[in-house]
Image (spheres, coloured by chain):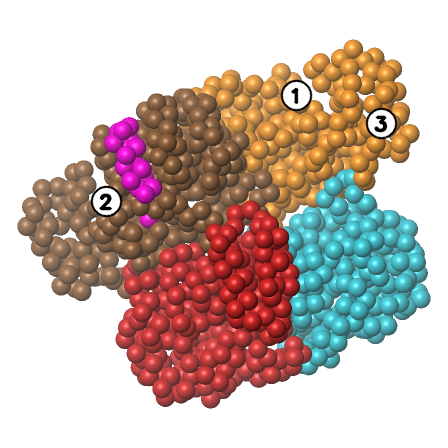
Chain colours: A brown, B orange, C cyan, D red
Amino acid sequence: MLIVMRTDATPDEIDGACRAVRDLGLSPHPIPGKSRTAIGITGNVGPVDPGQLSGLPGVVEVIRVTRPFKLTNREMKPDDTHIHLGGLTIGGPDLIVIAGPCSVETRDQTLGVAREVKKRGAQILRGGAFKPRTSPYAFQGLGAEGLHILAEARAETGLPVISELMSTEDADLVEQHVDIIQIGARNMQNYALLRRAGQCRKPVMLKRGIAATLEEFLLAAEYIISQGNHDVILCERGIRGFSDFSRFTLDISIVPELKRITHLPVFVDPSHAAGRRELVIPLARAAIAAGADGIMVEVHHDPKKALSDGAQALTLPMFEQMMGELHAIAPVLRRR
Amino acid sequence: MLIVMRTDATPDEIDGACRAVRDLGLSPHPIPGKSRTAIGITGNVGPVDPGQLSGLPGVVEVIRVTRPFKLTNREMKPDDTHIHLGGLTIGGPDLIVIAGPCSVETRDQTLGVAREVKKRGAQILRGGAFKPRTSPYAFQGLGAEGLHILAEARAETGLPVISELMSTEDADLVEQHVDIIQIGARNMQNYALLRRAGQCRKPVMLKRGIAATLEEFLLAAEYIISQGNHDVILCERGIRGFSDFSRFTLDISIVPELKRITHLPVFVDPSHAAGRRELVIPLARAAIAAGADGIMVEVHHDPKKALSDGAQALTLPMFEQMMGELHAIAPVLRRR
Amino acid sequence: MLIVMRTDATPDEIDGACRAVRDLGLSPHPIPGKSRTAIGITGNVGPVDPGQLSGLPGVVEVIRVTRPFKLTNREMKPDDTHIHLGGLTIGGPDLIVIAGPCSVETRDQTLGVAREVKKRGAQILRGGAFKPRTSPYAFQGLGAEGLHILAEARAETGLPVISELMSTEDADLVEQHVDIIQIGARNMQNYALLRRAGQCRKPVMLKRGIAATLEEFLLAAEYIISQGNHDVILCERGIRGFSDFSRFTLDISIVPELKRITHLPVFVDPSHAAGRRELVIPLARAAIAAGADGIMVEVHHDPKKALSDGAQALTLPMFEQMMGELHAIAPVLRRR
Amino acid sequence: MLIVMRTDATPDEIDGACRAVRDLGLSPHPIPGKSRTAIGITGNVGPVDPGQLSGLPGVVEVIRVTRPFKLTNREMKPDDTHIHLGGLTIGGPDLIVIAGPCSVETRDQTLGVAREVKKRGAQILRGGAFKPRTSPYAFQGLGAEGLHILAEARAETGLPVISELMSTEDADLVEQHVDIIQIGARNMQNYALLRRAGQCRKPVMLKRGIAATLEEFLLAAEYIISQGNHDVILCERGIRGFSDFSRFTLDISIVPELKRITHLPVFVDPSHAAGRRELVIPLARAAIAAGADGIMVEVHHDPKKALSDGAQALTLPMFEQMMGELHAIAPVLRRR
């Protein structure tokens, strides 16, 4: 259910509506919009009787929301969510490119790549400090030291940084050092982690699980938002299929569908989807052409020496070519 | 195996090399290129001893082809295959758009849609006369009458037409009336049909089976080409997955991979992949951005009345919007 | 729609009901049952008004059939379909085992395997004469010669034989020589072939397409039955998935579901599903335990020398072990 | 790598070999077997030079283990892992049946079901206290109170209990109250949770992720075992596919493959795989016939009133029927 308030509703009227929702044993979620506030209602098992709410002061109407996801639903909040990060706006007209190494390996490597991608137009730096690895015997990332290196790279280049949070134990540390908290595909239904991320004061990029449906993906985002953190970025990164030529199958169709039914920014990670650098640039172009707000790619100054996922990292000349092509496509989508 | 001939090899030398291949019990396939002829060799179970061929007059070298597909392989023929159709070149720098109704339903409907899509820039008309339907009780197409309507639409608009061939029995009839023969996804491994299409003198568009790997797809094309018909267009139309929002999962990644490893034109059919018109335009943009040579879309002047697949047909205003956007993206890919 | 006739309805009354159906522009399909005849109705787009039929002489009631498949539907024909073949009954209480080589390679090989599997309890001999091969360059089977060898094996051992029909052109030849016509997974939606098989007077085993849903599978069977051939055996042979240890993913769950919603016999082919002989016996046991009417397995006297699919063929000792285990499980399912 | 010790190797010799492994910067994992001890080695990036270890006192040979999973690998430990729980042995000749409600809902419901399933032969009681739910708005389980109810049910019936651990925060609590700790499919790659479970002193049942390959599944088990907890039970519970009749696709083939390549007990959960009770009994029979050591099923005394997953819970008469059939199949597999 959604309570739509009048454009001139007072804070008291909004409070009053929230109180009335609570009196019914439900949870109110005020959602400020461009011209008016709406109040999402969750916690109901069956439908709520709108009559109990529609007569309250400042209330225009009470609408039934038909999908199981509520706070991520464009029916609840028609305006795009804009996430502000320094001078950047994610989810707005600017095309956003996140780039950097798969793993933070050394200070030199990370700062080197950071400088080079910034020079070529990247707006955010990525780099894994805590690395989810299929095998317990593989390189697991530098951990806290990796976060310090990322912070140093930000200090030098001015690029905000994104890095993955893998466990609730590390949440304080990660929140303190990064500008965007990444939740990886393997943890898309790790509900304790989603709830903890929902209590952070930093934006969260949620990657789609490798076999998650659209509904499961949005309900995972709902776990975060229902804890009070509205700044969620959705990221498609390829689903599991039977491909004999790519590591995962990039589900490009989810991009326009997500843009249609949610108000959240939508990104694509072509590097993990493809698993091979030859495919990354065409997939990045396809992502932007399909309507994504941005992409996240892996770049390495010397991919053959990468400690993880070297085969999918773009070289610097490839990254430069990609940036040129993406910016040529962006205006077709009314992006800058 | 592939025999590369000298640029100045004479027809006699090429004949001689073919004869030597036949003497080994194998099949030679001369592949004329821009600057020289190559001769593909098929029929060998194990590797062929190159020594028996490399010393022949006019032969530069004999190369082992490492993939099971041979005649579709760019290793065998580095130049893009160009298919000439009236004034059109498929697989060249022009972006090609095939449009029309799912089924030929009536003369008026087909001619009406043909005129409208031509006016908005479509270069080829599609329309199903023989319709593969999951249920034996569903509308199966107008058959021969449908082909006559398509021929009439071509006569009036000048657009070449493409329609599906579903059985060897209809091959003469279909070949006579259409300009491009379509083999549908359900028949991608109907080998009798592929062989028959390989004996036609018209180009063939081969749609990918809903669960075909890249290798299976190319080996299906190989069935056609090995019968002597080199004019094959590959078409991605979505694969089966677990999607809860689209009918199939468009495998956009196969587009750049096919362009990389084969010389054949690559098309995308976003209409069947999505199953819903809201997604068709973004997917068409993604296809062109990923490097496809063209797209095939369903357009209906009144989608709600369509006898088949109405939900996925673009309206005329949507088609017009799409054409504008595709032509804005094309130059990024050095297309017109 | 389904017309249920009285147990004592006369042939004239049945004819009359069929005539009434035809008068409505629809097709009647009389389905004789144990105690009474029912008449399936197909050809209607929307629901038929039962009032037009329920008052006819000999009619008990007119029932709406809710699924798109009609003639395969147990709602239409509650009794199991029994297919009689010599002394065998397929779909009845006997556990049926079809065994033999993947391909008919030589007379000696085929007769040799036939004798050995018969000795160990196989009731039907399999062997490919026309072989669907992914590559046009792979061994395509002996064709007509293979059929003659199979006929000879039948003459010597008394085992009925099953072999694949791949194209309508070969239908007369195949129908003449085999006892059961197999339609392979690649041709499950080759509708011309299904219709032709529906005109044959021999039972048809229809293998599930590698990405066919249950509904698509049954509608393919419906193509055959709607041509008048009611003797259809359904065969699960593995679906395409992401497995890193088996060639296909055996969808064991479809066995009990098919037994529940159709009246047709259900078989399982564990050899093609697994692609590796180590898994064939456990999967055969699982198939029978799940309720399959029988299994079809590949057996080779010397698998390492097989011209096709040697890795999945059981050796003779393995076949013998399997037969013992299957017959120990069968009584749990009230089978012999 | 694996060091095989002599049958009469002394504890000192085993210690010496472990020390030598540590001196190489690697981790030794002593694996006691029936007749001799082996020492698994992990932590090496490339191959280890066996010469450094093969000459040590008490060492028979040093073997290269070819798969990325080590401690779960039957090459490392040929004997089946037996997990002892009260008088039960999991992974031995006894067929083990775990049964109970999806969620612990009330004391009466849980104790009632516990008594009834015990009476019909279940050896272990299941029941969710912490429930992973796709939606944040769905019933999340009773938490600690649910664990107390389970403990009470154990006290009364003598059945050991299994319940799911969803977050590291609850690990102490769950470990204290349950006899087997379950890690659910959604958390199969929640590495912090796997590591924490590896530090527990209770056996762990690890459910396969919905799109996990066999290798990923075993490497997840490896995370647990490499922390020192060797008592891991693997559980197949269905993978995501395109089924139009079951919630997930039970991958029955993984059962014999896991039994072949690992020494761990293998279970199947047909309830979650099917999502519909009509399919549960045939799938349970198939699981045992394929070689599973046991099954886990949901049973509810009144499925229509279940707070979660009611459609897949067996009724008590169905459970009784299933037990009879499983025990009739078990002897074929040399089980009791």
Mark 3 or mark 1, whichever is nearer to me: 3
Residue at numbered disc 3: B51
- Decide which of tag 3 and tag 1 comes sooner along the chain: 3
Quarter holding residue A9: top left
Density class for disc 1 (Cα within 10 Å; few <14, some 14-19, many ≥20) is some
Q: Is residue D144 left or right of residue C251?
A: left
The magenta span reads A145-165
Look at 88% across and 59% down and name the residue there: C110
The dot on residue A176 is 2
Was residue A153 drawn as part of the magenta stretch in this picture? yes
Q: Is residue C287 above or below residue D209?
A: below
SS assignment at label 2: helix
The overriding secondary structure of the stretch rendered in magenta is helix
Look at 49% across and 60% down and name the residue there: D19
Front position in the image: D133 or C218: D133
Look at 57% across and 81% down and name the residue there: D94
- The verdict on a common chain for dots 3 and 1 is yes
The amino acid at mark 2 is Gln
Marks 3 and 1 sit apart, C-alpha to C-alpha, by 27 Å
Regarding residue B201, the answer to whether it shows in the image is yes
Look at 60% across and 46% down and name the residue there: B211
